[in-house]
Amino acid sequence: YNIAIIPPILRREYIATLEQAHVDTRGFIDFIVERVVETQRDLLRLLGDEAVSSRNDGVDDGVNQLLKLIARHPGSRVPALAQALGKSPPTVERYLKRLKADGKVEFRGAPKTGGYFPV
């Protein structure tokens, strides 16, 4: 079996997806697959595989898909974005965090009624 390292910063997301797996396993499976891939990439980087750091990974593809979706449907919220992408809400939130840090999207409006917009 491949190993999946779950860093402490992702512990809450891991537990949330594990609890949700009692109802729907998709989010948990997505989370574990991402962690397995990232763990393998980390191990390859440690062993000196230069090709790994230059390769576009599935996470980047997901982030780019999310950015395009927000551009087409500005003001969307996490549940709708997750459903449209076929990803779990925690995965979409992780992608959004990356897009916000890069200054590509922003949340506008009240917490209960606002949505994400391209910058």
Image (cartoon, grey):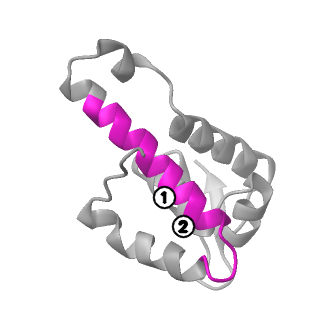
Q: Is residue 28 located in the magenta-colored stretch of the structure? A: yes
Q: Which residue is situated farthest in the front direction here?
A: 1
Q: Magenta stretch: residue 22 in it?
A: yes
Numbered label attached to residue 94: 1
Q: Tell me the chief SS of the magenta region.
A: helix
Q: What residue lies at 37% left-to-right and 21% top-to-bottom?
A: 52
Q: Position of residue 101 (x, y in %)?
A: 40, 50
Mark 2 Cα within 10 Å, few/some/many (few <14, many 20+)? many
State the image coordinates of residue 102 (x, y, percent, origin top left): 43, 43
| Whether residue 33 is situated above or below residue 58 in the rendered picture | below
User: Taking 98 as reference, is 57 above or below it?
Assistant: above
Which residue is rendered at x = 51% and y = 58% of the image?
Answer: 31
* Viewer-proximal residue among 98 and 8: 8
> Which residue is most to the bottom?
112
Residue 32 pos. (x, y %): 49, 56
**Which residue is located at x 65 percent, y 69 percent?**
25
State the SS at label 2: helix
Image position, residue 56 (x, y; %):
50, 25
Residue flagged by tag 1: what amino acid is it? Arg
Q: Are marks 2 and 1 in contact (CB under 8 Å)?
A: yes
- The quarter of the picture where residue 12 lies is bottom left
Q: Is residue 66 above or below residue 74?
A: above
Magenta stretch: give its range: 21-43
Residue 50 in the figure: left or right of residue 21: left
Q: CA distance from mark 2 to mark 1?
A: 6 Å
- Residue neighbourhood size for the residue with mark 1, other residues' Cα within 10 Å, grouped as few (<14), some (14–19), many (≥20): some
Residue 92 seen in render: no
Q: Residue at x 77, y 63 (%)?
A: 83
Q: Is residue 5 visible?
A: yes
Left or right of 36, for residue 48:
left
- Residue labelled with disc 2: 90
